[in-house]
Image: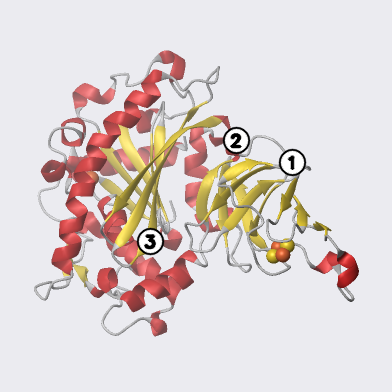
């Protein structure tokens, strides 16, 4: 791990633990308008301008294990198929046939040499090129070369696969900025999928993201698990470019050198600082990754409506031998469900309350500023001129964005 970053985070942890008042450079965090969580117009803008433009996490490269492996995703809104070509390259396409628009695959995942539409059997190679048109004698001037599947951007960083519907989006690594280097410490290419948990939440997607960007709620909501493990007074955060963030919270002393994972399933790449703390990366817009040795999860918040969200927990662990998932990974997933159940139970009542006439703009402490940072990035993607009245975030924290 970069020695300067390690030293900087450790020093900041000590400053956080020692302070008895806001830090000298802190300002009152500007309020957050509640309409951002309730207004259907705001939601539609997010779908188009945030989820329609950003890089979105869809999995690990090993989940497309052989040429022809494909997986569907609908979660950004549009049906998209991500497929490994016979040449080994991973690509993404809209799942829409160039004949009359039907899906070219209706299975969520599988392996195929061709993607064949089930309406009239036009078939496409795994590179998206139109290969076969039955009864082509009836089409006048058909130019098959120009009728390939419509591509969606698909890039891999350190084994992690992202897609973007924005043909003009900057390269993924550039979008991730310093996070790309910092997270590569976990040796992404050496990871493997463990399993997925999905929860339906009755809240706006941003309410759930917000809850992963602070540890202030941990003592109240998770008194019997996370609060026993972490010292919330040590929470140290960085607002990174493009709405990304890093949050580090120290484990209580007795747990710092306590092995949480068997030697067999330990990830040797994980730096000491991340073993002694919980460090989570917020990857804008909807991904939070609390890195850990052993198995850990990529938390994805997928909007399904203005006040509904699908929370998808995709678990990964260092490569292991054999087909069966090691029991200790399954145990960790189950344990985490306890924490998630507490967060989940918290969300619907908050959505109801902030949707009521009694709701007023949200007041944040300095230790919750990552939420402001995240919300401000939403505005930047939508375009501040396009926001519905009285929903805009302030720009007052823009100068606090850090390079590492
Ligand atoms: S819509 Fe696909 S073959 Fe007709
Ligand atoms: Fe929580």
Q: Which residue is mark 2?
A: 62
Q: Which residue is rendered at x = 69% and y = 70% of the image?
A: 100
Query: In the image, is 310 to the left or to the right of 116?
Result: left
**Is 13 above or below relative to 381?**
above
Q: Specify whether residue 215 is in view.
A: no
Q: Nearer the viewer, residue 345 or 225?
A: 345
Residue 232 x/y as whole percent: 18, 41
Contact check, label 2 and label 3, Cβ < 8 Å: no
1 or 3: mark nearer the eye: 3
- Judged from the image, the secondary structure of the residue bearing numbered disc 1 is loop
Q: Which mark is residue 304?
A: 3
Q: Nearer the viewer, residue 251 or 159?
A: 159
**Is 121 above or below relative to 312?**
below
Label 1 crowd (10 A; few <14 / some 14-19 / many >=20) = some
Q: Quadrant of residue 128?
A: bottom right
Query: In the image, is 164 to the left or to the right of 232?
Result: right
**Nearest to N terminus: mark 2 or mark 3:** 2
Disc 1 from disc 2: Cα separation: 12 Å
Q: Which residue is rendered at x = 60% and y = 40% of the image?
A: 61
**Nearest to N terminus: mark 1 or mark 3:** 1
Q: Quadrant of residue 195?
A: top left
Q: Which residue is rendered at x = 21% and y = 61% of the image?
A: 26
Label 2 crowd (10 A; few <14 / some 14-19 / many >=20) = some
Residue 207 x/y as whole percent: 27, 59
- Judged from the image, the secondary structure of the residue bearing numbered disc 2 is helix
Instruction: Give ligand 2's quarter of the image.
Output: top left
Disc 1 from disc 3: Cα separation: 33 Å
Q: Which mark is residue 88?
A: 1
Residue 334 x/y as whole percent: 30, 30
Q: Specify whether residue 351 is in view.
A: yes
- Judged from the image, the secondary structure of the residue bearing numbered disc 3 is strand
């Amino acid at each position: 791990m970069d020695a300067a970053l390690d030293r900087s985070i450790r020093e900041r942890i000590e400053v956080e633990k020692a302070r008895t008042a806001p830090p000298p450079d802190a300002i009152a965090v500007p309020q957050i308008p509640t309409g951002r969580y309730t207004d259907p117009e705001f939601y539609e803008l997010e779908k188009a301008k945030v989820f329609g433009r950003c890089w979105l996490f869809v999995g690990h490269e090993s989940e497309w294990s052989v040429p022809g492996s494909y997986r569907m995703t609908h979660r950004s809104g549009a049906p998209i198929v991500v497929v490994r070509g016979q040449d080994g390259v991973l690509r993404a396409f809209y799942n829409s046939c160039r004949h009359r628009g039907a899906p070219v695959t209706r299975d969520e995942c599988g392996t195929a040499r061709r993607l064949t539409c089930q309406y009239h059997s036009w078939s496409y190679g795994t590179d998206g090129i139109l290969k076969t048109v039955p009864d082509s004698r009836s089409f006048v001037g058909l130019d098959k070369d120009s009728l390939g599947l419509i591509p969606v951007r698909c890039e891999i960083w350190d084994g992690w696969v992202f897609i973007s519907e924005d043909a003009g989006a900057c390269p993924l690594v550039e979008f991730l900025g310093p996070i790309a280097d910092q997270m590569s410490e976990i040796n992404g290419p050496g990871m493997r999928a463990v399993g997925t948990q999905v929860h339906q939440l009755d809240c706006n997607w941003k309410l759930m993201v917000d809850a992963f960007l602070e540890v202030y709620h941990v003592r109240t909501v998770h008194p019997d698990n996370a609060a026993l493990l972490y010292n919330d007074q040590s929470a140290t955060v960085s607002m990174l470019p493009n709405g990304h963030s890093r949050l580090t919270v120290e484990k209580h002393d007795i747990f710092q050198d306590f092995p949480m994972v068997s030697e067999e399933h330990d990830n040797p790449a994980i730096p000491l600082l991340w073993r002694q703390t919980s460090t989570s990366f917020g990857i804008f817009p909807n991904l939070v990754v609390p890195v850990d040795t052993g198995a850990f999860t990529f938390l994805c918040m997928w909007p399904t409506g203005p006040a509904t969200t699908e929370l998808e927990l995709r678990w990964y662990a260092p490569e292991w031998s054999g087909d069966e998932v090691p029991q200790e990974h399954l145990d960790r997933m189950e344990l985490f469900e306890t924490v998630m159940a507490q967060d989940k139970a918290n969300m619907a009542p908050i959505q109801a309350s902030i949707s009521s006439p009694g709701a007023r703009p949200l007041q944040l402490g300095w230790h919750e500023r990552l939420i402001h940072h995240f919300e401000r990035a939403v505005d930047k993607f939508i375009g501040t001129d396009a926001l519905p009245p009285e929903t805009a975030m302030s720009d007052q924290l823009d100068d606090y964005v850090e390079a590492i």
